[in-house]
Image (spheres, rainbow, N blue to C red):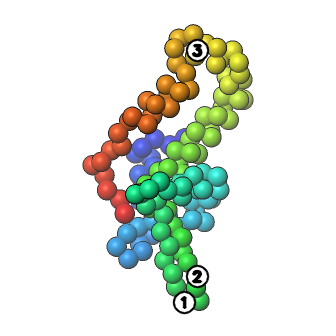
Amino acid sequence: MLNSAQIKELFEKEAVAFLEWEGVPIYRAIELFGIEAVDAGMDEKEGETLYCGYKIEGGYIAWHLLYKGFRKAATYANAEEIKRICIEKELAGKETRAKFDRIGITQQKAKLTILRAKPDKGRKHA
């Protein structure tokens, strides 16, 4: 699993130049995080740009994740790893959910907390 500093460092190490912006080629992002994570990293909402393509002769498009898409893919990969560990340790069962419910933490509340969190607007990539 990667924290924010590690994600930024990895992006800076793996990114290549495309005109005025930098991005990690899709093939490399898949090698790092897996295809499902990269698919999540390319799932744009209105008004956000997570990936771009650079078209060259012959119609080939060099697709790449911008920083925000790379971070989203890394986040997905982190969540998948947490899920795998919880299942492996049998922490994802009914007993755990019952414990969370007893202390007032539900998936809906957790989801709302995540949605309300404001992203770091100090960093601008791509």
Badges 3 and 1: C-beta atoms under 8 Å apart?
no
Label 3: how many Cα within 10 Å (few below 14, some 14–19, many 20+): few
Calculate the distance from the C-alpha at mark 3 to the C-alpha at mark 1: 57 Å
Q: Amino acid at mark 2?
A: Tyr
Mark linked to residue 101: 3
Q: Earlier in the sequence, mark 2 or mark 3?
A: 2
The residue drawn where x is 52% and y is 85% is 56
Q: Is residue 86 above or below residue 13?
A: above
**Residue behind mark 1:** 57
**Residue behind mark 2:** 60
Q: Does residue 43 appear to the left or right of 116 in the view shown? A: right
Residue 87 placed where, x, y %? 71, 29
| Residue farthest top in this picture | 102
Label 1: how many Cα within 10 Å (few below 14, some 14–19, many 20+): few
* Quadrant containing the C terminus in the rendered view: bottom left
| Residue farthest left in this picture | 122
Mark linked to residue 76: none
Residue 7 seen by the camera: yes
* Quadrant containing the N terminus in the rendered view: top right
Calculate the distance from the C-alpha at mark 2 to the C-alpha at mark 1: 7 Å
Residue 114 placed where, x, y %? 45, 34
